[in-house]
């Protein structure tokens, strides 16, 4: 399977899977650990990847992925290009609320090499929310992890009455204002 | 999909914390666990309902619209083609690999045979040598063929360049011819123009000549007349004075052409100035009393000796 699809597998009971895509592996690891440390009442599996598509060999043992988080480091153009290339391998149904862009390194604006307008345009084009954060700070990392967990819960269908599409449309409306 | 994939699944699904939670709860209170279980069961039911709803909506969305179905069919066909291509590639790679393996096996077998130093091994060595010879010969012939091909290509290139040059020359010749034709035409036109101009000049000359002739032919009315001094002898002053009288008393018109006119012209400017106010009409109409009295002979005699003295 070259394209990741949101509904090609059945969900596993009381569990959710999140996929972190980004070139900065240390930050990915740190974020994954903070997400695991958070208190929660369901099973979570975190998959890390530097780029898409995911390898096809282990596709059969991979659970259904509920949320894809693209981590864009503002300080490296390579990460941005990599994410742009990876987006082609994501099924369109994912962009109905199951994708979010995590823009990291925004605390040091003077070292930005990716234009903010380009990042914002990416978020607009793919109808997905942008989350700005500075993952190297402990507090922000924890809060980001909590946000992602909540989103994951919604995307995995653990919150009755709220679907991913509904949530994303809510986020979009707040963005437009 | 033979493209190298960088993506690697590094983190295995970690379920340790979730598993630890219920375990701790079990250790603390046994009675609460059942309640928790009921709660969790209810929660799970809700989860399942939500997930089912989402899946069903997705299915509905896929089914409802017909264009989507068409798109899906197209997508399926595309994927089928892709998969077929992949299968072919896999088959080819598999065949190549098996061939390589066969070769390796044969080489291994030959080596073992050679180590045995039998008659067969000698034979094999000979055959190998022959194969080498043949292969070198084949290589040489291939080299020659390549050289020949290169030469042929060079010749072809030269021919092409020559053709192009010839085409260019032809074009040049054509343009030259065109230019020449144009020039000839231009010359003809110029000659025509020259002829026309010459004709025009001639015509204009003719017309001027004719005009001159007409002007000459026109009757000439002289505005000034000169007296014929040679034929008529110079009149004396007395005569002129006498001659002047008749016009004063008579009805002679001063401008009329006559034999007495030259006498009139001969008058000095002073006498003339005195004469000007006395027109002939005035002289005629003047009453007798205003006229100068005619002189008597005595008077005349009296005056003349005075003049002479």
Image: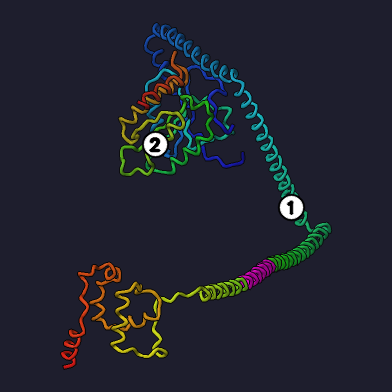
Considering depth in this image, is B204 or B159 the residue closer to the camera? B204
Q: SS class of the residue under badge 2?
A: helix
Instruction: Report x, y in % for residue B237.
Output: 28, 88
User: Chain under label 1?
Assistant: B
Q: Are marks 1 and 2 on the same chain?
A: no
Q: SS class of the residue under badge 1?
A: helix
Quadrant location of residue B119?
bottom right
Label of residue B107 in the image: 1
Quadrant location of residue A120?
top left
Label of residue B170 in the image: none
Q: Say whether residue B238 is visible.
A: yes
Instruction: Report x, y in % for residue A160.
Output: 44, 13
The quadrant in which the C terminus of chain A is found is top left
Q: Residue at x 42, y 32 (%)?
A: A123
Considering depth in this image, is B211 or B104 the residue closer to the camera? B211
Say if mark 1 contacts mark 2, CB within 8 Å.
no
Q: Dot 1, how many residues are within 10 Å of its Cα: few (below 14), some (14-19), or many (20+)? A: few
Residue stretch rendered in magenta on the structure: B169-193
Classified by dominant secondary structure, the portion drawn in magenta counts as helix
Name the residue tied to disc 2: A27
Does residue A4 sit above or below B219 in this rendering?
above
Does residue A96 sit above or below B292 in this rendering?
above
Instruction: Report x, y in % for residue B17.
Output: 41, 22
Q: Which residue is drawn at 23% across and 70% down?
A: B288
């Amino acid at each position: 399977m070259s394209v990741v699809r949101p509904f090609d597998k059945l969900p596993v009971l009381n569990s959710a899977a999140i996929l972190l895509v980004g070139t900065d592996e240390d930050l990915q690891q740190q974020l994954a650990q903070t997400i695991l440390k958070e208190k929660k009442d369901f099973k979570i599996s975190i998959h890390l990847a530097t780029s898409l598509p995911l390898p096809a060999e282990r596709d059969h043992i991979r659970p259904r992925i509920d949320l894809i988080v693209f981590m864009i480091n503002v300080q490296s153009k390579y990460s941005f290009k990599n994410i742009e290339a990876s987006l082609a391998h994501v099924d369109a149904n994912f962009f109905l609320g199951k994708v979010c862009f995590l823009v990291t390194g925004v605390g040091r604006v003077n070292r930005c090499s990716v234009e903010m307008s380009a990042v914002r345009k990416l978020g607009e084009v793919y109808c997905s929310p942008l989350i700005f954060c500075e993952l190297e700070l402990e507090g922000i990392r924890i809060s980001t992890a909590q946000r992602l967990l909540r989103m994951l819960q919604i995307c995995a269908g653990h919150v009755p009455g709220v679907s991913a599409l509904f949530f994303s449309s809510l986020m979009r409306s707040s963005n437009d204002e | 999909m033979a493209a190298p994939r960088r993506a690697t699944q590094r983190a295995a699904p970690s379920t340790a914390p979730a598993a630890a939670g219920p375990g701790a709860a079990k250790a603390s209170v046994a009675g609460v666990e059942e309640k928790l279980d009921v709660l969790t069961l209810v929660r799970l039911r809700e989860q399942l309902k939500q997930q089912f709803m989402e899946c069903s909506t997705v299915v509905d969305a896929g089914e409802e619209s017909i264009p989507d179905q068409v798109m899906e069919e197209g997508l399926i066909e595309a994927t089928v083609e892709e998969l077929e291509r992949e299968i072919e590639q896999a088959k080819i790679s598999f065949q190549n690999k098996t061939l390589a393996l066969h070769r390796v096996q044969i080489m291994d077998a030959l080596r073992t045979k050679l180590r045995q130093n039998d008659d067969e091994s000698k034979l094999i060595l000979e055959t190998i040598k022959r194969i080498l010879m043949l292969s070198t010969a084949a290589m040489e012939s291939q080299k020659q063929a390549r050289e020949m091909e290169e030469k042929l290509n060079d010749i072809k290139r030269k021919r092409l360049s020559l053709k192009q040059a010839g085409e260019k020359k032809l074009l040049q010749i054509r343009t030259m011819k065109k230019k020449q034709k144009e020039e000839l035409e231009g010359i003809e036109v110029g000659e025509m123009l020259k002829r026309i101009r010459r004709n025009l000049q001639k015509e204009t000359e003719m017309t001027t000549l004719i005009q001159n002739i007409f002007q000459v032919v026109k009757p000439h009315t002289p505005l000034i007349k000169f007296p014929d001094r040679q034929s008529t002898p110079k009149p004396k002053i007395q005569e002129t004075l006498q001659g002047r009288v008749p016009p004063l008393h008579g009805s002679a018109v001063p401008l009329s052409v006559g034999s007495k006119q030259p006498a009139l012209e001969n008058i000095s400017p002073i006498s003339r100035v005195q004469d000007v106010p006395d027109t002939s009409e005035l002289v005629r109409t003047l009453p007798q009393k205003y006229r100068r009295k005619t002189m008597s002979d005595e008077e005349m005699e009296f005056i003349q000796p005075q003049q002479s003295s």
